[in-house]
Image: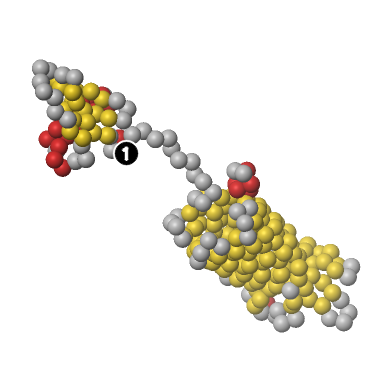
């Protein structure tokens, strides 16, 4: 089938001789002619001379598939220090507390400047509240799924925005002899917005600064004492590009 197509192309090229990039040579005699083809050329041979010859366009040449490189797709691990707090009703005395985050991420190029960046994290959130007589912290643990669209300002800097979805693993009040499970009073689902800035140090490492702004009420309460509270967090993240390390 491929040979037949090449023969037909040779005949068509004969009629388009003056409009194409073709090398021409005429023989003194024309006792016979034949159409020939190779992997790179098609043409017509008249006797011992070549009447015309043309190289095949690149579109007809078979080339191996180009593998997806790290400029198009990368994946790796993330580790972050988290400063978390809770905003909303009755939170004036709440203060930030330190937490951790670890998980995985991927970065897929949609265009030269737009990237889709999903994450899957374990993250600690919550807050601290204290007075002269006690010091207690609310410790929330989530599986977090942020889905960001990142914009590349240049080769080093990216900024991004997107939603996050949180799934509660545990909720406890701890401190000063207190160890209370409050998961029954905490919503099992959290939703919000993540804003991020990332700076690429090398092909293997990047730094990130981001902010989580919860939009769904994490207080699971009923009756006349209904109130709304929301997660807030600042993340200082280190990204390790495993794909680039493996490709070295």
Q: How many marks?
A: 1
The image quadrant of residue 112 is bottom left
In percent of width and height, residue 33 lies at: 14, 20
Q: Is residue 37 at least partly visible in the picture?
A: yes
In percent of width and height, residue 175 lies at: 85, 68
State the residue position of label 1.
58
Applied colour scheme: secondary structure
Decide which of 80, 67 is in the foreground and name it. 67
Work out which quarter of the rendered image holds the C terminus and state it.
top right
- Packing grade of label 1 (10 A; few <14, some 14-19, many >=20) is few
In percent of width and height, residue 159 lies at: 54, 66
Residue displayed at 32% across by 38% down: 58
The image quadrant of residue 169 is bottom right
Above or below, 125 relative to 55: below
In percent of width and height, residue 89 lies at: 66, 79
Work out which quarter of the rendered image holds the N terminus and state it.
top left
Residue displayed at 60% across by 64% down: 199
Seen in the image, is 33 located left or right of residue 63? Answer: left
* Residue reaching furthest to the front: 28
Seen in the image, is 126 located left or right of residue 158? Answer: right
Residue displayed at 60% across by 47% down: 243
Q: Secondary structure at mark 1?
A: helix
Decide which of 35, 73 is in the foreground and name it. 35
Residue displayed at 48% across by 41% down: 67
The image quadrant of residue 43 is top left
Above or below, 245 relative to 119: above
Q: Is residue 162 at least partly visible in the picture?
A: no
């Amino acid at each position: 089938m491929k040979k037949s197509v090449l023969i037909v192309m040779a005949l068509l090229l004969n009629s388009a001789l003056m409009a194409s990039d073709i090398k021409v040579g005429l023989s003194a005699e024309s006792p016979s002619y034949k159409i020939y083809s190779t992997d790179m050329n098609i043409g017509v041979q008249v006797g011992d001379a070549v009447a015309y010859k043309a190289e095949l366009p690149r579109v007809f040449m078979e080339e191996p598939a180009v593998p997806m490189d790290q400029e198009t797709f990368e994946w790796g691990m993330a580790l972050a220090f988290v400063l978390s707090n809770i905003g909303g009703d009755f939170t004036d005395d709440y203060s930030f507390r330190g937490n951790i985050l670890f998980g995985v991420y991927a970065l897929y190029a949609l265009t030269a400047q737009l990237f889709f960046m999903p994450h899957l994290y374990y993250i600690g959130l919550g807050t601290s509240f204290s007075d002269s007589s006690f010091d207690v912290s609310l410790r929330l643990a989530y599986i977090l799924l942020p889905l960001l669209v990142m914009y590349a300002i240049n080769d080093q800097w990216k900024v991004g925005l997107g939603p996050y979805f949180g799934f509660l693993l545990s909720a406890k009040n701890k401190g000063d002899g207190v160890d209370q499970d409050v998961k029954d009073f905490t919503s099992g689902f959290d939703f919000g917005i993540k804003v991020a800035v990332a700076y690429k140090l090398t092909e293997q490492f990047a730094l990130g600064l981001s902010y989580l702004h919860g939009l769904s009420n994490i207080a699971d309460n009923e009756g006349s004492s209904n109130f709304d509270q929301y997660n807030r967090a600042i993340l200082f993240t280190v990204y390790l590009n495993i794909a680039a390390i493996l490709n070295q």
